[in-house]
Image: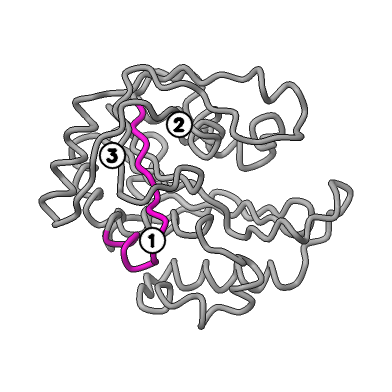
């Protein structure tokens, strides 16, 4: 619903994306493309995938016609290989909603090539952090790295759009993640499932949390970190999002991860 109900996060993404004119490609890891082997999308014109059901009809009319890039996909493969991470090209994959929904606000012009990277079904915080570390070298070449997921994602606790008061466990989990992310306590973050309060309740399965490790791995100690938004929707769905990089919004020089 972020696509049609942007709220504060949508506005922050839109402001950030205005300063991406020097970005020449976007690499995105989303929990909605899970594969056995790591894959890199290389379709020249990836379709907009409406991979959800039961939502307002307007969502199925939305399209994000960004081009793909075979050259960037090959560059991603080569970059991963240099770090000992094997992947393969996928010439058919489109842009799932974990990709196009945030990009709809970040870069509504859809004028920057987008290359999706899959989330392996056996991914762990360690392996996804390593994936981010490998992808991070692309930032120096004008590539933005995006980890698209959700700070909390227990949809079994959804009680309707009328619920507005954040549940305590959502706040406590988000606060823990924010604190350990700001201090780059990578060890604790990697072991978040046993160390963070209410981690298993916040993420009964962790595929929607793992993309954060991509962005965290691609960032560096020299980066400034910006908290884009801390809104909680429906009492249980935290929209908390971060960006790293040169966050002087008067500058167009460096790329950013979200």
Q: Is residue 186 left or right of residue 34?
A: left
Q: Earlier in the sequence, mark 1 or mark 3?
A: 1
**Callout 2 secondary element:** helix
- Please say if 183 is above or below 39: below
- Extent of the magenta region: 114-130
State the residue position of label 3: 254
Q: Nearer the viewer, mark 1 or mark 3?
A: 1
Name the residue at 45% across, 31% down.
17
- Kindly tell me whether residue 23 is visible in this rendering: no
Residue placed under numbered mark 2 in the picture? 17
Report x, y in % for residue 162. 89, 48
Q: Nearer the viewer, residue 40 or 167?
A: 40
Q: Is residue 166 magenta?
A: no
**Label 2 Cα crowd, 10 Å radius (few <14 / some 14-19 / many 20+):** many
- Residue 244, how many percent across, how many down? 38, 51
Per the rendering, the mark at residue 123 is 1
Considering only vertical position in the picture, is 232 above or below 28? Answer: below
Label 2, label 1: how many angstroms apart (C-alpha)?
Answer: 29 Å
Residue at 47% of width from left, 26% of height from top?
Answer: 107
Measured as percent of width and height from the top left, residue 33 is found at 45, 42
Would you place residue 152 above or below residue 23 in this image? Answer: below
Magenta stretch contains residue 128: yes
The image position of residue 20, as x and y in percent, is 37, 30
Q: Secondary structure at mark 1?
A: loop
Of all residues, the one furthest to the bottom in this rendering is 195
């Amino acid at each position: 619903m972020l696509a049609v109900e942007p709220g504060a996060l949508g506005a922050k993404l839109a402001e950030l994306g205005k300063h991406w004119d020097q970005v020449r490609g976007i690499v995105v890891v989303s929990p909605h493309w899970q594969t056995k082997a790591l894959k890199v999308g290389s379709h020249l014109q990836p379709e907009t995938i409406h991979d959800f059901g039961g939502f307002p009809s307007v969502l199925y009319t939305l399209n994000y016609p960004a081009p793909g890039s075979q050259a960037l996909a090959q560059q991603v493969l080569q970059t991963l290989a240099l770090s000992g991470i094997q992947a393969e090209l996928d010439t058919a994959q489109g842009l799932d909603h974990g990709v196009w929904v945030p990009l709809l606000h970040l870069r509504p012009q859809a004028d920057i090539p987008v290359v999706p990277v899959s989330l392996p079904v056996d991914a762990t915080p360690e392996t996804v952090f390593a994936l981010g570390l490998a992808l991070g070298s692309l930032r120096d070449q004008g590539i933005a790295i995006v980890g698209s997921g959700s700070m909390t994602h227990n949809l079994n606790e959804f009680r309707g759009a009328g619920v507005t008061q954040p549940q305590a466990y959502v706040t406590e989990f988000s606060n823990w993640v924010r604190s350990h992310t700001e201090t780059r306590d990578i060890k604790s973050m990697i072991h978040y499932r046993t160390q963070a309060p209410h981690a298993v309740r916040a993420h009964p399965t962790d595929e929607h949390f793992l993309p954060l490790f991509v962005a965290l791995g691609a960032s560096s100690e020299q980066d400034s970190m910006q908290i884009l938004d801390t809104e909680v929707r429906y009492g249980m769905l935290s929209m908390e999002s971060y960006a790293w990089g040169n966050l002087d919004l008067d500058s167009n020089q460096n790329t950013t991860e979200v």
